[in-house]
Amino acid sequence: MPAVRAALSEVFRPEGDDASAAARSRRDWVVDGVLFLVAAFLGVTTGVNSFQHGLRGPLLVIDAIGGVVLCLALWWRRRWPLGLGLASLPVLAVSSSAGTAGVIILYTVAAYRRWQAAVLIAAAQVALLPLEYAIHPQLTVYYLTSTLGLAVVAAWGMFRRSRRQAHRERARRAEAEEQLRTEQIRYAERTRIAREMHDVLAHRISLLSIHAGALEFRPDAPPEEVARAAAVIRASAHQALDDLRAVIGVLRDRTDGQAPQPPQQTLGALPGLLEESRAAGMRIHAEVRVPDLAAVPDTIGRHALRIIQEALTNARKHAPSAPVELCLDGAPGQGLAIEVRNPSPVFATGQSKIPGTGTGLLGLAERATLSGGHLEHGLDERGHFRLRAWLPWPN
């Protein structure tokens, strides 16, 4: 008995989205109306034929009532297909007028429920054919074709159901792929924002840390030096706030779904960046072999400036007392080469007091790759830390 109950539960259980077939669109209403009219017309025709062949009395009344009831039941066939399929069996046994409505209900069961349920209803209708023939022997041709007709209707309903399920599965996969693409875009957006925030603020904050550290470790410094350091701290703080406002402003303004663009600072700002770093105490030997920095395209110039800025920030963090060598070379059609070299922290005379997140070099590599170039870093044969980047510079 438990096995039988489990089997019946599996047959009668709605599958997937088929359980929600009650929601009808305008097209569904039109189809249901047409099917109702067809079932009613053929039911009346069959009833008249039965009357002409001698069906009289209570059997004629039962036949007509059964046809009317099952035709009206077609309006609920989408909501309760299996229930109507089971309820239609005793009606079909005594009413030839309900035959067309019964076939439509069988198709609905096959189209909206599991194939086992459709086979069950079709088999039950075939099993009732001898009883129907006993009551309505005048419809011989109808009974001869009923078995084949029921099989065709059930098969057609199953085919439509499989097509609908395949369409839904494709829609689910498309939706899942779209969600995945959206998540990837959001992740790339978050990564881009994090990279911009890091590149913009790391340089300024490191300058603040160096000057604040100088004030901390030299409390007896002359007032002129203290005032000069405080002015640099204030200027760096204001510049950091301005850069932060620029990034946030750009992010807020990009309401068209495009990627946020970095602040519009190009390679032409390199002299000012070097001057700031030297004012913070860095010893920088810069060899700039590009005659006109403004001639570098803005997109490449922005990436190049950020790479140099981050390289100087890393040198200031991890080898604060070491000299830094910068070489910038390139031409249209040849690309833009950047090389920054400084003794590694092991050989530097000072120790870094500025904590790092460990994401700066990773962000630089991502930036170079996104611009179509490449970046490499590590210790050279002299034990110095070297960062080398190449960016495309089209003609």
Image (cartoon, helix red, strand yellow):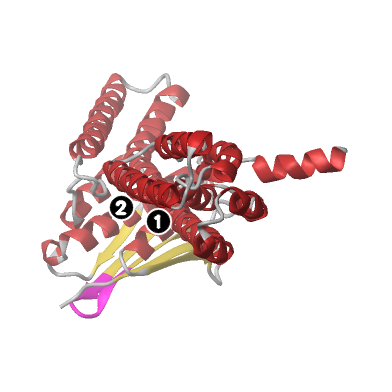
- Residue shown at 17%/48% (left/top)? 264
Secondary structure of the residue carrying numbered label 2: helix
**Residue 105 at x, y = what percent?**
49, 46
Please give the range of residues in magenta: 329-337
* In the image, residue 333 lies in the stretch drawn in magenta: yes
**Residue 292 at x, y = what percent?**
12, 66
- Residue shown at 44%/38% (left/top)? 64
Q: Main secondary structure of the magenta part?
A: strand
Please say if the residues under marks 1 and 2 sit with CB atoms less than 8 Å apart: yes
Read off the residue under disc 1: 364
Q: Amino acid at mark 1?
A: Leu
Screen quadrant of the C terminus: bottom left
Residue 238 visible in the picture: yes
Whether 328 is drawn above or below 115: the answer is: below
Front-most of 35 and 302? 35
Image disc number at residue 306: 2
Screen quadrant of the N terminus: top right
